[in-house]
Amino acid sequence: MSTHAQIGVTGLAVMGRNLARNFARNGYTVAVHNRTASKTRELVEEFGGEGEFVPAETAKEFVESLERPRRLVIMVKAGEPTDAVIEEFAPLLEPGDMIIDGGNAHFADTRRRERDLREQGIHFVGTGISGGEEGALHGPSIMPGGSVESYDSLGPMLEKISAKADDGAPCVTHVGPDGAGHFVKMVHNGIEYADMQLIGEAYQLLRDVAGYSPAEIADIFRTWNQGRLDSYLIEITAEVLSHVDAETGKPFVDVVVDQAEQKGTGRWTVQIALDLGVPVSAIAEAVFARSVSGHAELREASRHLAGPSARTLGKEEAAAFADQVEQALYASKIVSYTQGFHQIATGSEEYDWDIDLGKVAAIWRGGCIIRAAFLDRITRAYEAQPGLPSLLADEGFADEIAAAQDDWRSVIATAVAQGVPTPAFAATLAYYDSLRAPRLPAALTQGQRDYFGAHTYHRTDRDGAFHTLWGGDRAEVSA
Ligand code: 6PG
């Protein structure tokens, strides 16, 4: 029995299969295993020429084929299936061996698993892998957590199979201990939701207000993709919008049911942000927008609700409006990433992960779903100012938003006037204005809370907490 496989992959659905192929194509000897053994045989039959695979019919055979310290990648559904595979393999492993979980696990599960396996001397490496099936095969962005020792062993291999940024840097870094990798992948997915929602709102405005066809909007997105919005999501949006349904000859986007689904990582991002007290309003609105779209009965029952009399722009106006929408989309994108990185920084502090935000931005420049030229800007901003409290504190981004804000505001005002829902655009502007505001209505909130619940408040002119005797002479007392 061969015991020289440098890495092993169990779970050979498309993502797992493509990851195994990627390792093999890069010269590694790859042990492969699947609960349904036929999948293992199919992989070797179909792709055996791409490199050296060591097929294993059983978990024991699979483990025995791995060189020490063993590196075992599990690519199965998050949740119980992952726990089941760990329970199957852990007893076969020895101290110093590594289990790499490449699924979209919840970081809290990863922290639990890492802690439990560490007691057996086994390294558990929760690893975010972004880029879908193509990314897994040709080079994903990889976000491993876990111990430094495990990264010392795995890092060179992951760097070899990862995507490479334009400057050649591998899109992988040791994000931080225990669940840090899956936490960052979760926020990546939250930002992905926000990016997709903002693009969707821009599309709807160009469709309903400017009166452009999907094909015309595709051309507009292609133009935007040559500039500061250059990104994978903008690129594929143009492809989706220019696609014609073969059966009906209609624009593809018009024959698709307008109810967005979600596997859950965007939802987790918002839930965790609420626990951490981080306002990720763009991501939250993106999650809620998907939920709203799915309430078909509620939408049907609301068809009769009054709305403004919409007016489609003339040709000249439409072109000018499209330029304004680009400004609004870019400004909203800056705010949305500001919120996402704030969540990563807060999570890093909360869980003592010491995450390097510049390195996170750097590994998102290639391979992942949110890959974009924009991330070069963010990488440079954090590299230049490591302690940057917010991307909006970066002079370059602040100047770009300042230049965009009139159009940003005008587009949102037009959307409101024309009854086109733009929850994420509006949320990002509200966040921006809330940060800028010299005073917020939170002062009134504190007064109300003290009135009905004696929850006390602080004063602007002296330290301490106070309460007003609302039911009596309204005297103020120290709390
Ligand atoms: C990636 C993707 C992937 C994710 C789905 C999102 O980084 O490759 O984010 O991990 O699971 O593409 O699916 P939902 O939109 O259903 O959450």
Image (tube, grey):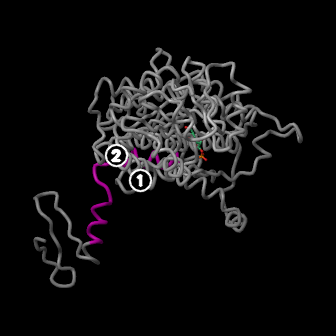
In the rendered image, residue 426 lying in the magenta stretch gets the answer yes
Check the picture and name the quadrant holding the C terminus.
bottom left
| Amino acid type of the residue tagged 1 in the rendering | Ile
State how far apart marks 1 and 2 are (Cα): 9 Å
In this rendering, position of residue 104 left or right of residue 395:
right
Q: Residues within 10 Å of mark 2 (few under 14, many from 20)?
A: many
* Outermost residue, front side: 1
Write down the residue under mark 2.
347
User: Residue at the location (45% across, 35% down)?
Assistant: 334
Check the picture and name the quadrant holding the N terminus.
top right
Q: Nearer the viewer, residue 368 or 212?
A: 368
How far across and how far down the image is residue 19, in percent? Answer: 59, 30
Q: Nearer the viewer, residue 395 or 237?
A: 237
Part of the protein shown in magenta: 424-449
Taking 280 as reference, is 451 above or below it?
Answer: below
* Residue 321 can be seen, yes or no: no
